[in-house]
Image (cartoon, rainbow, N blue to C red):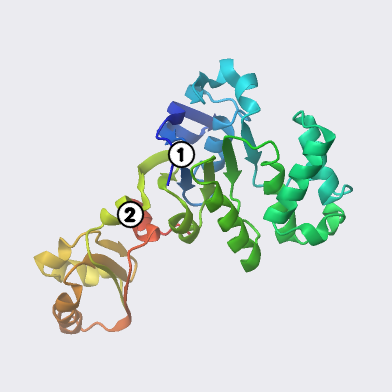
Amino acid sequence: MRETSEVVLRVSGLRKSYGHLRAVDDLDLEVQGGEIFGFLGPNGAGKSTSLSMMCGLLRPDAGHIELLGLPLEAGCKASVRKIGIAPQDLVFWEMLTCKEQLEFVGRVYGFSCREARARAAELLAIFGLQEKTNSLGKTLSGGMQRRLHIALGLVHRPSMLFLDEPQAGLDPQSRVLVREVLDSLRGSTTVILTTHDMEEAEKLCDRVCIIDRGKRLVLDTVEGLERRLGEGNRFELEIDAEIENSLLPHLPHRLREAPGLAVQGKSLHFTAAEGAAMLPELLAVVTARGLHVTHLRLRKTTLEDVFLHLTGRSLRE
């Protein structure tokens, strides 16, 4: 549980363009202290650009950012020592050992030699890198390099941690470890991360902002977002023809009005508490139209469904 509901990041009217491309378009949001806040969206949605502006790495074209109670422009020097950053591209020293890198960053932040050594040892243990203490950065596997990269952002015990795609390139073992480390920060450190991995967002985030083509589509808890598609199970139906023309006009009214109804090519998705009772009626329409079911599935509602409902396409497209 979070220890505070204080707003530690406030963003209003944030914009950023590259030529004629509007990468971020009038973004508004607030992040509360101690929560794990996720930006969810496909590649190119504007997540990384938004994150870079919020932590002071990129100047916005317009808008206002308040970080830890201070306007970012005026409070940058005071705030920067309280935030940690781990961008998507790995940042570490190839020719320094893991221990040397962590100790060096500690010294940069004003730790004594003893404090830097202790903090380095602590983080090596937390990220499962003890056996690589004296290994050069360039000799680590991709997953271990990502772990070290995130650990470097935590050396100075920041009150806020910005992570851009922290699960990128991780093997299954590293993925679980990083998730557990971030989960352990909940309540004491505010974590703001970007991801296009809906499963990780569902497991980790307190609240999620879904962003697409630079615009905020919706912001809510994971449970709140999923409830927007209605109560009950999620149904997937796939037939051997385009649903928009062959099936949709012929569905009974209660099916056409089903919560979270989404059509994507040959696939139909909807949510219904009494979905099992609706299936015979649905299949009867399919048969009457001379169509054939190629896939039928009943499952839990996910953030992928929310995105599909909002945009008409998959996160992976």
State whether residue 229 is above or below residue 112: below
Q: Quadrant of residue 234?
A: bottom left
Kindly identify which residue carries mark 2: 223
Quarter of the image where one finds residue 260: bottom left
Horizontal side of 309 relative to 162 (left or right) equals left
Residue drawn where x is 46% and y is 35% of the image:
33
Residue 261, x across and y down, in percent? 24, 61
Dot 2 or dot 1, earlier in sequence: 1
Residue pictured at 10% horizontal, 65% vertical: 253
Instruction: Identify which residue, 235 or 104, lies in the foreground.
Output: 104
Q: Residues within 10 Å of mark 2 (few under 14, many from 20)?
A: some
Q: CA distance from mark 2 to mark 1?
A: 24 Å
Q: Does dot 2 land on a helix, a strand or a loop?
A: helix
Secondary structure at badge 1 equals: loop
48 with respect to 304 (left or right): right
Does the rendering let one see residue 18? no
List x then y, in percent, for residue 102: 78, 43
